Amino acid sequence: MIRLLITCAVLLPTVASTIAAPAKGEVEVRFLAERIPANLGKVVLANKETRSDPFDLPMNNLSRPQKPPARLFSVWAVEHNRSIATIQLPEEGNSFVVLLLPSAKGDYSPVVMPFDNPNFKGGDIYFYNNANKPVLGMIGKAKLSLNPGKGTVLTPRGFGNKNYYHVMLGVRETEGNKVIKSMKWPSSKTMRNYVFFFVDPINRRITFRGVDEFIPKKIPKT
């Protein structure tokens, strides 16, 4: 699994995705936070009229599907009694993933994507650069170049063999490119991955962490 090989990142468990579609007309959201303050506590999804049941934001896996009160709502920290993110869901689609990225203001900036995204398949990696410098990479033979505040889906190419591909990740410094990590990553069509680049709050260096999401094979209709 990817989490066993990224030795400089936080080691993370795998989570199985639910393939059941929401009921007609219902909207559901799964959350994933890049990082979570130790004292955050539980959150609710709220607007002026309605609040959801409290739940814990995850950073090691996608949350269970949550029912927002509307397509425009806040993620509200219960213990601090304040909004930590404002989410505007697209008008099209009923199932979404929301990535919560720490901002300089001390809250979260959301990235919203369809849960069943045909452009983010098993075997793909979604990279987001929440650091302050451009990041670079070679994932097999696929190249990554990502400016701060940007995200992209990348499909690895050029496997070392059928089980893994070679990966090199780095950062563009003023004096030249600097390698963060060189390693082997496993290849799997039943997994898609989220990789966040960010500045470590302790040593102030750019690092990264990855989260695996298991994609069950859909049973064909008979």
Image (cartoon, rainbow, N blue to C red):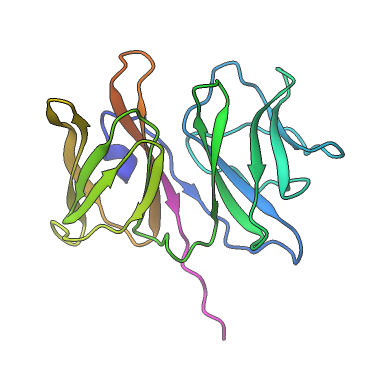
Which residues, given as a range, are shown in magenta?
212-222
Task: Name the image quarter holding residue 44.
Answer: top right
Q: Position of residue 106 (x, y in %)?
A: 55, 20
Residue lying farthest front? Answer: 174
Residue 195 visible, this angle: yes
Query: In the image, what residue occupies the spot 28% across and 20% down?
Result: 205
Query: In the image, what residue occupies the spot 18% across and 54% down?
Result: 140
Query: In the image, what residue occupies the spot 70% across and 17% down?
Result: 80
Q: Position of residue 24 (x, y in %)?
A: 75, 67
Residue lying farthest top? Answer: 202
Q: Is residue 178 magenta?
A: no
Image height of 141 relative to 151, above or below: below
Of the 4 image quadrants, the one containing the C terminus is bottom right
Task: Name the image quarter holding residue 54.
Answer: top right
Image height of 98 relative to 191, above or below: above
Image height of 193 relative to 9, above or below: below
Q: Position of residue 212 (x, y in %)?
A: 41, 46
Q: In this view of the protein, which residue sits in the foreground, 129 or 18?
A: 129
Residue lying farthest bottom? Answer: 222
The number of numbered discs placed on residues in the rendered structure image is 0
Image height of 125 relative to 171, above or below: below
> What kind of secondary structure does the magenta stretch mostly adopt?
loop
In the image: residue 13, left or right of residue 91: left
Task: Name the image quarter holding residue 81.
Answer: top right
Query: In the image, what residue occupies the spot 52% across and 79% down?
Result: 220
Q: In this view of the protein, which residue sits in the foreground, 55 or 144?
A: 144
Residue 194 visible, this angle: no
In the image: residue 39, left or right of residue 203: right
